[in-house]
Amino acid sequence: MNSIITQVELSRLAGTTRQAVSKAIGAGHIKVNRKRRVVFDHDLTQLWYQKQVAKNTEAPAQGMAQPKTSESEPAVSLISLQREKLEQEIGKITADKRLKQLQLAQKRDVLIEKDAVAGVLFQYIDALNIAMLDMPEMVVDVVIDKISAGANRGEIIKIMRDSIRKSIVSTKKQIKGRLK
C-alpha cells in the first residue's frame, strides 16, 4: 500500500524546504500521484528522502530538525543499497529496451530489404511501362476490325482496357511470385 503525504509533510520529515521538495519533484526524484501528493514509500521518493536525511546529518541547517545519529547510520547504508538497486534496475530496463530495438531492427531487415525490393519492383514497372507503350500496336488491328464491323465507342474502349488490365494483372502475379 502506498503512503501518501503532502509536500509540506515531506519537507518537514526530510528537514528541507518545500521549494527543495518541489524542485526534486520537477526533476523526477520524488514520485507524486495525480493530485501532486507524495508517494512516500516509492523507491525514488525513499532514495531522495534518505539522501536528504544523510545530507542533514553531515551538515545540519539552522532551525532544521536533526535526525538522531543512531538512526542516520542505517539510513546511509540503506541509501547506498537503494541507489545500487535502482541503478541495477535502470540498467536492466535500458538493456531490455536496447535488446528489443535490436530485435525489431533485425526483423525489419529480414522481412524487408528495401534496395532488393526496389530493384525487383523497378524492373517490373519498367517492363509494364514498355508493354503499355507497345499496346496500341498490338490492339490496333483488332480495333480496326471492330470499327469496320460497326462496333461502337464503348466496345473499342473495353478492348483497350482489357488489354491494359491483362498486362497489369500479369505483372502483379510476376511480382508476387518473385517476392515469395
Image: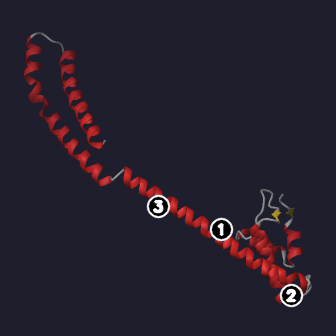
Query: Amino acid type of disc 2?
Result: Pro
The 10 Å Cα crowd at callout 2, few under 14, some 14 to 19, many 20 or more, is: some
Query: Amino acid type of disc 1?
Result: Glu
The residue sitting at the top extreme is 150
For residue 113, above or below residue 60: above
**Mark nearer the N terminus (3 vs 1):** 1
Q: Left or right of 61: which side holds 82? A: left
Q: Quadrant of the C terminus?
A: top left
Residue in the image at 52% along x and 59% along y: 100
Q: Nearer the viewer, residue 76 or 15?
A: 76
The 10 Å Cα crowd at callout 1, few under 14, some 14 to 19, many 20 or more, is: few
Q: x, y (%) of residue 178?
A: 26, 42
Residue located beneath label 2 in the image? 60
Q: Left or right of 107: which side holds 80? A: right
Label 3 SS: helix
Residue located beneath label 3 in the image? 102
Residue located beneath label 1 in the image? 89
The part of the image, by quadrant, that contains residue 125 is top left
Query: Amino acid type of disc 3?
Result: Leu
**Mark nearer the N terminus (2 vs 1):** 2
Q: Nearer the viewer, residue 62 or 51?
A: 51
* CA distance for labels 2 and 1: 32 Å
Q: x, y (%) of residue 128?
A: 20, 38
* CA distance for labels 3 and 2: 49 Å
Q: Are marks 3 and 1 in contact (CB under 8 Å)?
A: no
Residue in the image at 82% along x and 79% along y: 75
Q: x, y (%) of residue 115?
A: 29, 54
Residue in the image at 58% along x and 66% along y: 94
The 10 Å Cα crowd at callout 3, few under 14, some 14 to 19, many 20 or more, is: few
Q: Left or right of 166: which side holds 44? A: right
Which numbered mark, 3 or 2, is in the foreground of this view?
Answer: 3
